[in-house]
Amino acid sequence: MALNDSTETARPGASGPTAPLPRPIGRLRAAIPAALYAAALIGLAEPPRMSGNVWSRYMTIESIVERGTLSVDDCPYLVPSGSPDLAKFGGRLYSDKPPVLPAMGAAVYAPLHRIGWKMFDLRSPQAFISSFGPVNRALVGVLIALPSALALYAMRRMFQAIAIARRLADALAIGFGFSSLLLSYGVTFNNHSVAAGLLTSAFAIVLLSDSQGKAGVARSAMAGLLAGLASTIDLPAGGALWAGLLAWILVRSRKAGAGYLAGSAPPILAHCVLQSMVTGSPLPVELYPEALAYDGSYWSTEIGTFKESIPRSLFLVELLVGPQGWLTVTPVLIFSPVGLAWAMWGRTGAIRSGAIVSAIVSVVLLGYYSFGVRRTDYSGQSFGVRHLLPITPILFTYAVAALERLRMRVWRGIFVALMLIGGVYAFEGMEDPWSRIERRDDLPLRIVRKLVVYPHSSYAR
C-alpha cells in the first residue's frame, strides 16, 4: 500500500535513514476499532451533556441557519441558556468561541432544520426535548464522535512504527479510547475532541510518509488541511502542532512544505473571514478582553472576576498532577517521556522527528496554559484538563513505544493499572463532563482521588 501520492523523495539525510514499518497493517484493521468506538460514542450521547460553553456554540449554529448571522442577540434561548461565554462587538452579542466549528455545525443542522427539526422549539418543554434531542445527537455524532474515532484510527496506524504485537496494539487503541478524556468529551459538543481527531490524523500522515523516506506533496497538503482546520478550531493546540508539523515537513522537502501550506490555506482563510465578521479582524475574542466586560456580563461581576491566588509555577504543578491534572486523569502518560526520550536518543528517522515535535509542542502548551493565559481558571466547570486533549493521542503513541522497550512484566502491569485508573476518570467524566472533579462526591472518584499527587485546587468560581 503506497504511503505517498508523489514520487518526490526527501533530501538525503534530512531525517535519518528509513526502514520498513515494524508492524504494517491494512487500513481496514485500523478502522475496525475506530468504527466500534464511534458507534459507542453515538450511543452514549444521550442524554445531552450541556454547559454554557456548549450553549454558546449551539446558539451560534442556530443563528447562522435560522437568521443568517453569527450574532446571538435574537436567539430564543439566549436568556434561558444562562451562558457566560459571550462577547459584545458593535453593540451585538456573539459567542466568544472561534466561529469555524459553529459554521461546520450549521452545515449539519441546516438539513435537519429544513425537514422540520428545530434546535430551540420553545412552544412547550416536551416540544423542546423532542426536537432538541435529535439535533444534539446529530451534531455530537457527526462533529464529535467521528473525529474522536478518527483519532483512534490515526493512532492505531501510527502503532505500525512501533515493534509491538498487532493484537496488543488493537487492544491498546480501543483501551485508550475508553480510558482517556477522549471518552469523557466524546459525548458532548466541544472543540478539543475535534482537534484531537484532526491533529492526530495530520501527525500520522507526516509520520508514516516520513517513515517511508518520501515527502508526498498530496499527503502533505492533506496534513496541512487537517492541521490548518484544527488551528482554527482549537487555536493553542492546533496552532502549535501546525507549526511543528510545518517545520518537520520543511526539513524533509521544501516542495512538500509548500503543499502543506497550500492545504492549510482554505480553513485558515475561512477563519479569517468568519472571525472578522465578529471581532473586525482575524484575531480571536481572547485578544479583546474589553468585549467580555460589557454591562451585564458574568465576567464583570465579582464572582466572575479573576484573582491570582497562587504562583504560576505552582499552577503548572496543579495543571499536571492536581485534582484535575493532565497526568492525574490520564496517568498512563507518565510513560510518554520515556518513549519520547528513547525515540529522540535511541532511534533515527520519523519516530525520532515525531518525538522532537511532540516534546516541543507539549512544552509550549504547558508553558502557555500555565504562564501565557490571562487567567488560570479557564477550565471553568469542566472535567479534567480538556485543553490538552488534542495532543494526548500522539503522546499515548510514545507511551506505547516506552512499553515496547520496558519489557519487564512489572512495567506492563503498571501500564495496565494506570490505564484502569484513567478508565475510572474517563467513565466518570462521560457521565458529566461539565463538572469539576474535586467538587464531585461519586464513590469511584473518591477512591482514585486518594492517589492524587497534589490534592489542591486554586479554582475559586
Image: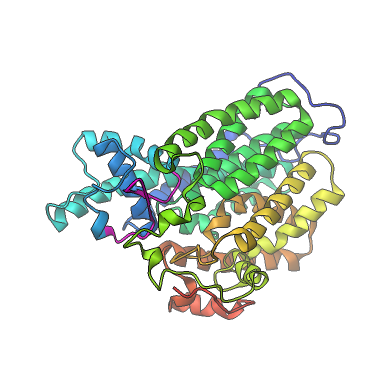
Q: Please provide percent x and percent y for residue 371.
A: 64, 62
Q: Is residue 454 left or right of residue 254?
A: left
Instruction: Please say if 34 is above or below 326.
Output: above
Which residue is depicted at the point 65% across and 25% down?
Answer: 259
Is residue 82 inside the magenta stretch? yes
Give the quarter of the image for residue 111.
top left
Instruction: Please say if 293 is above or below 251.
Output: below
Q: Which residue extends farthest left?
A: 123
Looking at the image, can residue 239 be seen?
Answer: yes
- Along the line of sight, which residue is nearer the eye, 358 or 234? 234
Q: Which residues are magenta?
A: 81-98
Q: Is residue 181 left or right of residue 97?
A: right
Q: Which residue extends farthest top?
A: 7
Which residue is depicted at the point 41% across and 53% down?
Answer: 291
Q: Please provide percent x and percent y for residue 155.
A: 62, 45
Q: Is residue 138 left or right of residue 210?
A: left
Looking at the image, can residue 32 be seen?
Answer: no
